[in-house]
Amino acid sequence: ARTYLITGAASGIGRATARQLSARGHRVIGADLKDTDISADLGTGEGRALLAEAAADLGGGRLDAVIACAGVADHDPVTVRVNAFGAIATLTGLRPLLAAGRHPRAAVVASVAALHPTDPAIVDAVLADDEAAAVAAARAAIDRGEPQRVYTSAKHALVRWVRRAAVSDAWAGAGIPLNAIGPGIIRTPMSRPMIGDPEIRAVADAAVPMPLNGYGEAEQVAPLLDFLTSPENTHVTGQVVFIDGGADAVLRGEEG
Ligand code: NAI
């Protein structure tokens, strides 16, 4: 049995993944705002520090895998705080525990939205690790009427960070595969309001075309996170594995 730390474990993709891994006999330490083992707000520095401390305590100084699912889709700067800085802090903050684990692996949930138009000011600020600048840029994007760019930019920056970090000494050099997944539209509490509104749904269907099997379920995403963080994954690293019913292939065509 392995010990997994999963953020966003109280709902949606994180919860489905936690349940699947628990059912296979693994130990899962959940983190979320509430309703799981560790209550921590990953939109804040205090919450990120608390996560690392509590994970060290509960894991006994080691973790075998980290799966970062926590995220929001609000038209608000909090989205860049949680989806980019919170996710990156989860990976970097728990990396020392992984380094002490067995067959350590990490995965983070990005999105097909990482392929959509972004705001370079937000992306650059995330990659420069400047949270104040990223929040200011997010506010500016909202004020000029491009609120959806906060989410796309946060996910895009996260993917770029993963590709950069995965091949560094800290990850590849330490024998730790690090990957992102890029889900299309998955039926969870996050996507429910969007799917339920015919106008927003039409925009989303055009932005995320899913010719294979349409919208996914959280339970259908979990096995991919399971594989990427299993000992069987020895050479997949620095990838964004799209699980999107073909959206990436439609959007980027043959050169993707
Ligand atoms: P969800 O809303 O069901 O689950 C997200 C979880 O993250 C919730 O339990 C929530 O409490 C937690 N969370 C939010 N803010 C937090 C914070 N500040 N600190 C700690 N935990 C926090 O949504 P879902 O769909 O399961 O989302 C999981 C991930 O998948 C997110 O990163 C999301 O952006 C991503 N995603 C979702 C897609 C979808 O269509 N549902 C598509 C592509 C990516």
Image (cartoon, rainbow, N blue to C red):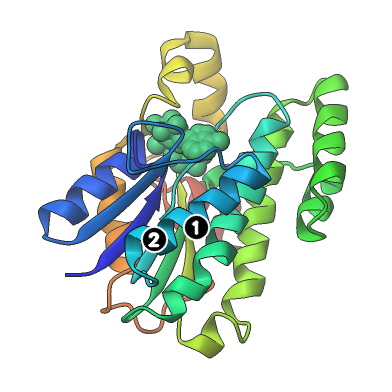
- Report, in whole angstroms, how far the alpha carbon at label 1 lies from the one at label 2: 6 Å
Q: Position of residue 200 (x, y in %)?
A: 55, 16
From the viewer's perspective, tell me whether residue 141 is left or right of residue 22. right
Q: Nearer the viewer, residue 90 or 146?
A: 90
Q: Position of residue 170 (x, y in %)?
A: 59, 81
Residue at numbered disc 2 = 57
Q: For the residue marked with disc 2, what is the amino acid?
A: Asp
Query: Residue 171: which quarter of the image?
Result: bottom right
Q: Nearer the viewer, residue 184 or 12?
A: 12
Q: Is residue 199 above or below residue 255?
A: above
Q: Is residue 105 above or below residue 107?
A: below
- Residue located at (43% from left, 67% from top): 106
Check the picture and name the quadrant holding the N terminus.
bottom left
Query: Residue 151: which quarter of the image?
Result: top right
Residue at numbered disc 1 = 53
Q: For the residue marked with disc 1, what is the amino acid?
A: Glu
The reply to whether discs 1 and 2 touch (Cβ–Cβ < 8 Å) is yes
From the viewer's perspective, tell me whether residue 81 is left or right of residue 126. left
Task: Count neighbours of disc 1 (C-alpha within 10 A) and say few if under 14, some if 14 to 19, many if 20 or more.
Answer: some
From the viewer's perspective, tell me whether residue 57 is left or right of residue 256. left
Q: Position of residue 229 (x, y in %)?
A: 34, 68
Residue 115 seen:
no
At numbered mark 2, what does the secondary structure look like: helix, strand or loop? helix
- Residue located at (82% from left, 60% from top): 128
